[in-house]
Image (tube, coloured by chain):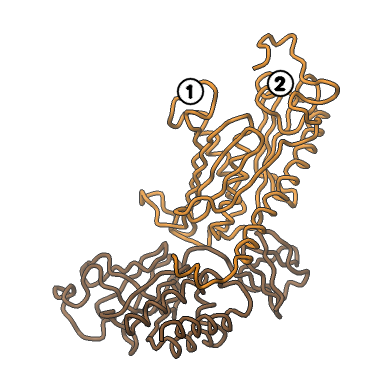
Chain colours: A orange, B brown
């Protein structure tokens, strides 16, 4: 941990951030598709120190019945943090924060899902945060979007999500834990690659100019993440294609 | 054939008239709705790699009885929606209190989707010659997205399998497949169908399967 006294924190060293990134650089991203055998679609995402796993089930029958919609599928999104995901043990189970994140994340994804194709059913999305390092909601949305595609659910577009923030009077992309805790502002967004924004939150303060700058930066971050999402989905299929056909292999199964 | 992996939202064509299955049109351009394989013919179709079976009227499917109500059998059809088989759709006239004597809980049936309405009430029928209760053979389950490949162009793959494997095969659109034949033939059929499921998206599959069957049969005799 860095020094707790807020007055003498410096977020930059030789023009680089504490973890060696430039101000407009995202943390390294790793995406793996289809990691859970029993889910209809799944995805594991690492964004810097964040590790999240998303599972999609459905469309399937709605339980409890009264939630059912006659003309469309409903979408349920559960964001949950593992008790071991943060330094100080988090009390397990839903709390006010995770209820809010579940709601905004669901609303970030719902506009692209063609729910009218599956009346009277439900699409369940579960996002588990295994390790948190600021920006877990964005990592969760990125994972959920890939998992939905993997489940074969019709969507108008993918969704990518990234945050921008303000630390030490500088706008930075994808803040990590230290910058988030001791920074001046944090603004996560989610968007389609064509530029439509489906989630925008902010805490802290930004001037109109700073806001525009942060927005621009976050949009660039989303586009970068979109390319990684796209690559992971396409490479997964190419992997399947490359597996050779051998009767011995089939025999042993 | 021109095929390509696409993800949701990918631009497929500038010509709205080429929009096929698994695509949508926005501002006069065609985009993909699904993660799957885009097939460029006159129309562009995107074939999904995964997904749940959604029943359509006229589909031949295999279902399992999961409940019996007054005058209806509730059928699990491997889909988010249950199938309803009304007593009047049974080929013989039977009384409501005798329903479980003909089809009991857990019975597998070859059936046909008679009608699906907009609230996804799925009505099934047994009133056709090849439909009915499954008494012998085996039922296996694959992803319904692989069914078109198992059948092949104009039924080429499935008729070849029936001939080469010496088995009777009924392919349900919902991904359930009934095989009936000698024990050894069924084992080989099962193995072959699992290969087809795994490699459904590759080119020249029918030829490779013919080779595979030749080798397997050669090893046996």
Q: Which mark is residue A89?
A: 1
Q: Residue at x 66, y 58 (%)?
A: A235
Q: Quadrant of residue B199?
A: bottom right
For disc 2, the neighbor class at 10 Å (few under 14, some 14 to 19, many from 20) is many
Q: Quadrant of residue B28?
A: bottom right
User: Residue A38, percent across and down?
Assistant: 44, 54
Between B220 and A40, the one lying in front of the other is: B220
Disc 1 element: loop
Q: Which residue is label 2 attached to? A: A183
Of the two numbered discs 2 and 1 in the rendering, the one whose residue sits closer to the viewer: 1
Q: Residue at x 59, y 56 (%)?
A: A149
Q: Residue at x 60, y 65 (%)?
A: A243
* B67 on left or right of A171: left
Chain of the residue displaying label 2 = A
The quadrant of the picture occupied by the C terminus of chain A is bottom left
Instruction: Please check whether the numbered discs 2 and 1 fall on a single chain.
Output: yes
Establish if B120 lies above or below A32: below
User: Residue A233, percent across and down?
Assistant: 64, 56
User: Residue A14, percent across and down?
Assistant: 85, 22
Q: Earlier in the sequence, mark 2 or mark 1?
A: 1
Establish if A220 lies above or below B50: above
């Amino acid at each position: 941990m860095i020094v707790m006294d807020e007055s003498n924190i410096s977020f930059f060293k030789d023009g680089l951030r504490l973890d060696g990134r430039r101000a407009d650089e995202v943390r390294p991203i790793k995406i793996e598709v289809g990691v859970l055998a029993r889910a209809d679609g799944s995805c594991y995402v690492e964004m810097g120190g964040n590790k999240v796993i998303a599972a999609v089930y459905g469309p399937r029958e709605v339980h409890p019945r009264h939630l059912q919609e006659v003309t469309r599928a409903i979408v349920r999104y559960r964001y949950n943090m593992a008790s071991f995901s943060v330094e100080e043990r988090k009390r397990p189970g839903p709390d006010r924060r995770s209820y809010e994140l579940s709601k905004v994340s669901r609303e970030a994804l719902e506009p692209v899902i063609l729910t009218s194709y599956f009346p009277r059913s439900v699409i369940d999305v579960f996002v588990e945060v295994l390790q948190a390092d600021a920006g877990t909601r964005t990592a969760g949305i990125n994972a959920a979007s890939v998992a939905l595609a993997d489940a074969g659910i019709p969507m108008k577009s993918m969704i990518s999500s990234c945050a921008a923030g303000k630390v030490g009077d500088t706008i930075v992309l994808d803040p990590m834990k230290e910058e988030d805790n001791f920074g001046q502002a944090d603004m996560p967004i989610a968007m389609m690659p064509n530029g439509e924004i489906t989630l925008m939150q902010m805490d802290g303060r930004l001037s109109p100019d700073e806001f525009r700058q942060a927005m621009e930066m976050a949009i660039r971050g989303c586009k970068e993440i979109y390319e990684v999402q796209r690559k992971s989905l396409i490479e997964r299929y190419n992997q399947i294609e490359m597996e050779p056909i051998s009767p011995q292999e089939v025999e042993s199964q | 054939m021109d095929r390509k992996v696409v993800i949701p939202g990918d631009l497929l064509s500038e010509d709205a008239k080429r929009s096929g299955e698994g695509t949508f049109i926005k501002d006069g351009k065609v985009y993909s709705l699904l993660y799957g394989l885009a097939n460029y013919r006159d129309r562009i179709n995107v074939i999904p790699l995964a997904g749940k079976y959604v029943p359509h009227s006229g589909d031949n499917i295999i279902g399992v009885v999961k409940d019996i109500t007054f005058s209806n059998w509730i059928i699990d059809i491997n889909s988010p929606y249950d199938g309803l088989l009304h007593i009047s759709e049974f080929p013989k006239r039977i009384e409501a209190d005798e329903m479980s004597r003909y089809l009991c809980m857990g019975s597998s049936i070859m059936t046909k989707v008679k009608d699906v309405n907009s609230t996804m009430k799925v009505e099934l029928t047994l009133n056709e010659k090849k439909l009915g209760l499954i008494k012998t053979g085996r039922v296996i389950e694959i992803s319904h997205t692989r069914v078109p490949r198992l059948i092949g162009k104009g039924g080429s793959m499935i008729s070849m399998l029936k001939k080469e494997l010496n088995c009777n095969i009924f392919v349900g659109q919902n991904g359930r497949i009934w095989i009936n034949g000698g024990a050894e033939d069924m084992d080989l059929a099962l193995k072959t169908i699992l290969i087809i499921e795994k490699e459904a998206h590759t080119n020249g599959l029918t030829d490779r399967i013919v080779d595979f069957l030749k080798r397997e049969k050669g090893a046996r005799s």
